[in-house]
Structures are given as structure tokens and as C-alpha cells.
Amino acid sequence: MKNPMEGSRERVLARQEIMEALFRYAEGGKVTREIADKDGIYLLELTTEGPQEGETTEFTYRRKGDYPNKIKSPETLIEAAHYQDGFPVSANTLATYDPKTKEWTHNPIEEINKVYKKVGEALGQGGLQALIVQGHEKVLEAYKSICEQEKREISK
């Protein structure tokens, strides 16, 4: 009799594939923890230093499954935890691996944050703030225009 779980196991990513996925976010860093089982790596942590003193970010790859030391993951994913002076200040999921497509699905908010970070570095924070304010003003103008158009259509 065939085992119903046979053939349904997720593909285990090679270390190089994991590092490529992490470097999409980490842009360097140091591997601080790596744990594997007979199938391959199930936990890999990479730490980077932040722009301000005492800031660090820990990027974690976790393979789907239940592992020793209470490590559990309902799906294969990459997460980031941001620390200030050793204390966690935020954490979020950056990407999830889809075993059907064999592709990472990236969190769109993190993609946007990455763009803002690069634009901020290029323009300086004052330039980025000015750009955000101008963008906000343009959105408000568009919204007012839409409201005016809707009022005209209702009054017809």
C-alpha cells in the first residue's frame, strides 16, 4: 500500500538557493546560525548591521516542518527581525516559497520599503521626505478631482 504522504514532500532547497533568496534582502551579512537534518538545511540565520549604531537585522530562512528545539514552520519562508541595542523592535515575513511553482512570493510591502530605502539613500532623507509630500499632494489633488467628477455626475 502506498503511503499517502509519499511524493507530497516539499523540495529541499540547496544552501546556495537559500543564500540567494536571503541576499535579496540582506545585501551581505554574516551567517550566525545554520541547522540541518538528514534532508538539508531547515534553519539559516544571517545578521546584518544597520545604519545606526546598535541596529541589527536578523534574516531567517525556515523550511516547512516541525524540528527539534521547538522550531516549527507551517511553510518555507524568509523572515526579518529588526533589533535596536539587542531588543527586537519589529519583525515580518519577507517571502514565502511556493513548492508548486518553485518560486518565492515576496511581500509587496517589503518590496516597496526596499525601494524607499534606496531612493532615500540616493536623495538623502530630506529629498525623500519632499518626494513623499509631493506624492501625497498629487494623490489628494486626484482624489478631489474624482470627488468633483462624481458630484457632477450625481447632479445630472
Image (cartoon, grey):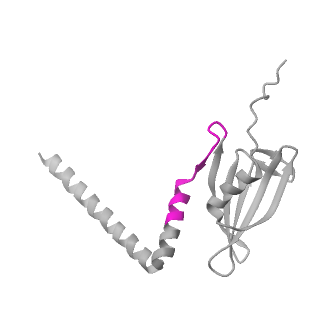
Query: Does the magenta segment cover residue 103?
Result: yes
> On the image, which quarter does residue 53 sit in?
bottom right
Q: Residue furthest left?
A: 156
- Taking depth in this image into account, of 49 and 15 the one nearest to the observer is 15
Check the image and name the residue furthest to the bottom. Answer: 53
Which quadrant of the figure contains the C terminus?
top left
Taking the image as shown, residue 31 lies to the left or right of residue 80, namely: right
Q: Position of residue 146 (x, y in %)?
A: 24, 54
Which residue is painted at 86% across and 54% down in the image?
69
In the rendering, at what x and y percent does residue 21 appear? 66, 54
Closest to the observer, 143 or 113? 113
**Residue under the image location 71 percent in, 57 percent down:** 19
For the N terminus, the quadrant is top right
Left or right: residue 4 compared with residue 106: right
At 71% from the left and 51% from the top, the residue drawn is: 17
Residue found at the very far top of the displayed protein: 1
Boundaries of the magenta span: 99-115
The percent position of residue 81, horizontal first and vertical second, equals 68, 64
